[in-house]
Image: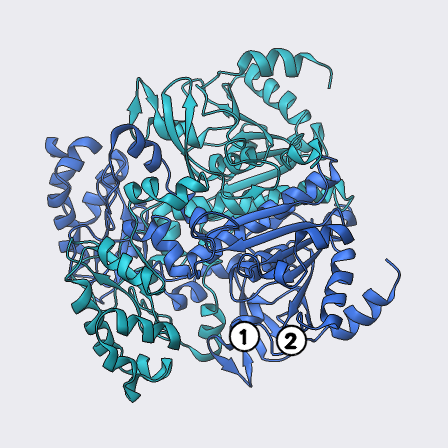
Chain colours: A blue, B cyan
Amino acid sequence: MSDVQKKLPLEGLRVVELGHYIAAPFATRLLADLGAEVIKVEPPEGDPVRGWGSVKDGHPVWFSVHGRNKLSVTLDLKSEDGKAKLRALCERADALVENFRPGYLERLGLGPTALHAINPNLIIARVSGYGQDGPYRDKPAFGAIGEAMGGLRHLTANPGQTDYPPPRCGVSISDDLAGMYAAMALVSACWGVKAGNHAGRVIDVDLVTSVFSLMEGMLPEYGLFGSVRQPQGAAIKTAAPTNTYPCADGKWLCIAGNSDLIFRRLMAAIGRPELATDPRMANNNLRCANVEELDQAIADWTRTRTAKEAEDVLEAAEVPCSRLYDMKDCAEDPHFQARDIVMEVQDPLIGPILHPAAPFRFDGVSARDMVRWTGPEAGAHNDHVFKELLGKTS
Amino acid sequence: MSDVQKKLPLEGLRVVELGHYIAAPFATRLLADLGAEVIKVEPPEGDPVRGWGSVKDGHPVWFSVHGRNKLSVTLDLKSEDGKAKLRALCERADALVENFRPGYLERLGLGPTALHAINPNLIIARVSGYGQDGPYRDKPAFGAIGEAMGGLRHLTANPGQTDYPPPRCGVSISDDLAGMYAAMALVSACWGVKAGNHAGRVIDVDLVTSVFSLMEGMLPEYGLFGSVRQPQGAAIKTAAPTNTYPCADGKWLCIAGNSDLIFRRLMAAIGRPELATDPRMANNNLRCANVEELDQAIADWTRTRTAKEAEDVLEAAEVPCSRLYDMKDCAEDPHFQARDIVMEVQDPLIGPILHPAAPFRFDGVSARDMVRWTGPEAGAHNDHVFKELLGKTS
């Protein structure tokens, strides 16, 4: 393999981040993992996300990941000097990502019209709660509300359950999805500039539409038939047995046992071979009609074992399953370790620290090579960027 | 605005899809929305995902969305003719996306080495359950297991609840995330080819790592402190009051009322002004310590109103909230309609049908312009592609 294959794909792409909290910084984290030169512009006191979560020696540990592979500079965008420096950065950049409230950049005099006057090829990706127009544009945006309004929270529930509310996904899913779409659209538009399809332009990504994009066939089914998808809990209505079962240690085991061959192996493994040959269970449709009896039989067996014990028995029987991994399970799993999905890196501020791999790999570049450096302190690259980069004629 | 701004960013990018079910076809759906020429290669009987969900006049309605903006051709990849046509397509393409089991393409003689011999600049994006290497590589992949092993299902739960299993997200989240990462990495590598960073290369995306990428600071916190994030249900431990509350019609209302100002407005709106001035509730930290009392007070109020009634009162008081939208709520919402997040399009096979907007917008192109055509029948473009495209010398 030639040396050229060791380069990351986005080397040479310069992206300015005017981000805070999750959505825009996650977009640029992914672009930085892909090799882009990301210049994160923070207020003098730093991105407020630095105040979230645990701290080691005064340094926020999430930011080691969330800010990795980025350059950090600090600017006061309300000052003339800050605005001038931001304009100079945008003049030399391929793209900008921001997640202020709609209209805020314009009020600073740094909206798309002003920035395109400086750099006509600049791609400007804007992330907001509800989008850059429409009646909800100016409402305050919260990730939980994007999850609710986009249709996801209605589905993340056990049917008929009234004593607990439907739980959140457990992560900032709407911010994450919007950040991913912003990154994807930004790189696409940068490709479009190189291909001569267009000059600089403006991208509009919002949390609600990002969540709503995952609703599969539910919208056309509602429109054509009036059917409204209801929550299905841990089961899949059209596949049986496929569910999540309680174990002796209070943990849960997810089992996908609905193909005919796997079903027979599963029944043998739990000591119920008579169900494997029961004509009432002969195919998936019949099993769906008798799913309660099957789920009961499987749960009676899982309740007598820890999740790991049950998983080991079913693994040996080649029945697809997984206990619900917590962070310890992930960190200790041999596959996660063999593929460096979990890896120890050196953070100069924090010391040895576990990082997750980038979610994409390229031949010729290892997962470890893709973590070039850990999240820096706010303003760590002021000298490098303002003196060296802006000091040069572009 | 000049005409050039009306082009979609990926016009002129040709992508071959060897996909089935969700992950790879979702990746190419997004690329097609972005303007790429996607040639979906299906077996003669069609992608089995066409058999999922509701049907109108014999046509699967989800595929109208899932296959939109794509060309469909049918090939038997086990025949010499099929392989020859696939090679000819790859010779003329910029990229290929596939989600077969690892090793399958190689067994067909269509692995990366063979395809790069034909087209050295081809970007090959591979999506699988566990990745192209590592001890779990050959295990059967199921979306539910990616969700479990990546750490998400452990979190999507109400703490201490044992009578119901933690529910699924409700959508094929691990396939969706992997498809999004595959699309993002593919476009990045196409940019890298244009920038001269590298020639064709191979991208490896898997369901487990894709889910795991959303785990925020949980991995470094586990590594440094041994702390294992536990499910938090509908609440956020560090923000109060922020939760999801039961309403009189059996629906749920998500309220984000944890900032000091919003908290006071919320307490006034629910007729509990004395809590707004209670010194035990004076800031977020104090409110977190007294969260049960606050949640009780709010739920006592929401239980007396339908979700829509409660939402209207809180909206008027400028308290961020949203009922958990089901598909009817989404389809009828004025913001979804004003922004064409939901739009009626004409499907020549099905008739008028609702489509969701692409999750990214570009100035100069409307959401409606981005739906160029609806999902075609399997093989609908055989003549166009095999005669016109392959007939021409490349």
Q: Residue at x 78, y 56 (%)?
A: A91
**In-image side of B121 versus B140 (left or right):** right
Which residue is pictured at 12% across the width and 38% down the height? Answer: A290
Left or right, residue A392 beside residue A253: right
Give the mark nearest the N terminus, 1 or 2: 1
Q: Residue at 76% of width from left, 53% of height from top?
A: A12
Q: Position of residue A64 (x, y in %)?
A: 57, 71
Q: Residue furthest front?
A: B316
- What secondary structure is marked by label 1? helix
- Can residue B133 be seen at all in this image of the molecule? no
Q: Position of residue A219 (x, y in %)?
A: 34, 36
Residue that badge 1 annotates: A50
Total marks placed = 2
Specify whether residue A305 is in view.
yes
Task: In the rendered structure, find residue A96 and report the number of the disc placed on it.
Answer: none
Disc 2 secondary structure class:
loop
Residue B386 as seen in the image, left or right of residue A312: right
Check residue A378 in the rendering and tell me which mark sits there, or answer none: 2
Tags 1 and 2 touching, CB below 8 Å: yes
| Three-letter code, disc 1 | Arg
